[in-house]
Amino acid sequence: MAATKSKAVYNVYRALSHGLSPLLYLHLHWRKLRGLEHRLRWPERLGRPSLPRPPGQLLWFHAVSLGEGMAAIPVIKQCIQRRPDLTILMTTTTSSAFEVIEKRLPTGVIHQFAPVDTPSAMDSFLGHWKPNAIVIMESELWPNLIMGASEKGITLALLNARVSTKSFKRWSGPLLLPLVSLMLSKFSLIVPLSNMQAIHFQLLHAPPFVINFSGDLKYVVEEFDISEGEIRSIEDLKVHLAHRKVWMASSIHKGEEEVILGIHRVLMQQYPDVLTIIVPRHPQHGKEIAQQLWKEGHGVALRSQHDKLVGDTNLYVVDTLGELKHLYRLTPVAVIGGSFFPTLSGHNISEAAAAGCAVLTGPYVGHFSRMVLEMQRLNPLSVLQVSGKVELEGALKKLFSDTKILEAHRTAAKQVYHSLSTGIVGKVWSLLDFQILQRALS
């Protein structure tokens, strides 16, 4: 009875997604006109490949955006090292992820935009690439993808698996639970982020025997090659920052710049040489911030314009992608944005910790709350979570006024990062090899 209901709900979804296909096509075209889809490669989102499929066995990794894509890369590198006979296909959904990940992927990895979850797009994609196994990152549970792969006998894995509190409530309801449980039954491996996430997946009827633990892949910070020009630019910036009070606010969302700039004005009164580095989540937002600050007469340098840090410059706005890891090495203090308004849900703090920054974040961190608590449990100084603007201002003043306190926070962050990140990729590889590759590629 349950199986029949699950199949019926999926058939309704498949029919609806098929019926909405013309509207989705128009929506993608509208997004392309607004610059939100790749100007030339947007047809890939309709399942139309831009490259031929190489011969041999193929493993498909799928991640929706930049964070999930970056978390997949260490596993992809391990796969290439251990199984050089495999072709690796990587798909992402967002343009921002495409721009950065395209440069980070190892040579030989095929990178495409992920198809929308309509029957025609997914059938076309699976029919062309014919993957032997699919590795999905985090929570990308799309019915046509999963059911289409299962019908074709393709093995499925879910890494860094998580479901938000909001999604869990929605998926647990009588309407969606049959469909979600049907999808989860098709996986041969689910690697959840935490014990709580494992419980969530079991309550959603995931088979208990496919659930295994490895650690959070977002702790793994990869080293990437950068061009000589980028190296010179970073080194030049380092020289200019050497004798100044510096702090950085990264992954800032719209509205959060007001919090950061308000604190910057207060710090300027006590430390006239302070430099605030602002790194918005989206580059266009950075340009907008810089333009507004210029109108107000502030000394601002914009990274994309290669502006120099001249005497009266006390704000440095980074409107580029893919440089955050290197910029963290230039600042002793990193405030992680996307965490100061209730509508936001935080960002990854591991890159800042790996660089040895004193790490601060706001109260709204979503599923990153586990990472914050895990790090604080090992050393309370490793991450400082503040309640809002007033507490952040006080924390920054304390860090700037006492070198010993600042160094204690920086050391704690780096030590805890290394403790939590060691061995994660090896554990994931062992699970993937045993549960997926040995079955799918034998």
Image (spheres, grey):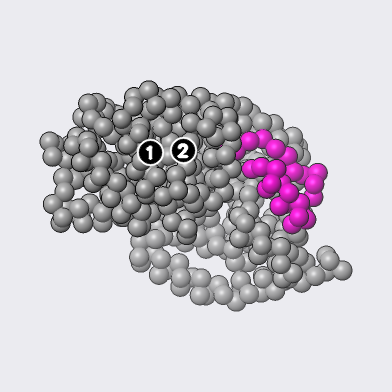
Q: Amino acid at mark 2?
A: Leu
Q: Which residues are magenta?
A: 193-217
Q: Residue furthest toward the right?
A: 1
Magenta residue check for 424: no
The quarter of the rendered structure image containing the N terminus is bottom right
Residue 30 point in image, percent of width and height: 40, 70
Question: Which residue is at 60% across, 55% downward?
Answer: 164
Residue 25 visible in rendering: yes
The structure residue drawn at horizontal position 69% and vertical position 31%, both measured from the top left corner, is 430
Which numbered marker is on residue 440?
A: none
Task: Indicate the position of residue 318 as horizontal and vertical percent values.
Answer: 29, 44
Q: Are marks 2 and 1 in contact (CB under 8 Å)?
A: yes
What is the x, y in percent for residue 362?
Answer: 44, 47
- Say which of 405 and 335 sits in front: 405
Q: Is residue 201 above or below residue 418?
A: below
Q: Is residue 234 left or right of residue 168?
A: left
Residue ID for mark 2: 384
Q: Mark 2 to mark 1: distance in Å?
A: 8 Å
Give the side of residue 189 with respect to residue 317, left or right. right
Q: Secondary structure at mark 2?
A: strand
Please report the residue visible at 23 percent of the width from the left and 46 percent of the height from the top: 265
Indicate whether 358 appears above or below 258.
above
Q: Could you tell me which quadrant the C terminus lies in?
A: top right
Q: Position of residue 14 (x, y in %)?
A: 67, 70
Residue under label 1? 395
The total of numbered circles placed on residues is: 2
Where is 392 relative to 271, above or below? Answer: below
Q: Nearer the viewer, residue 85 or 338?
A: 338
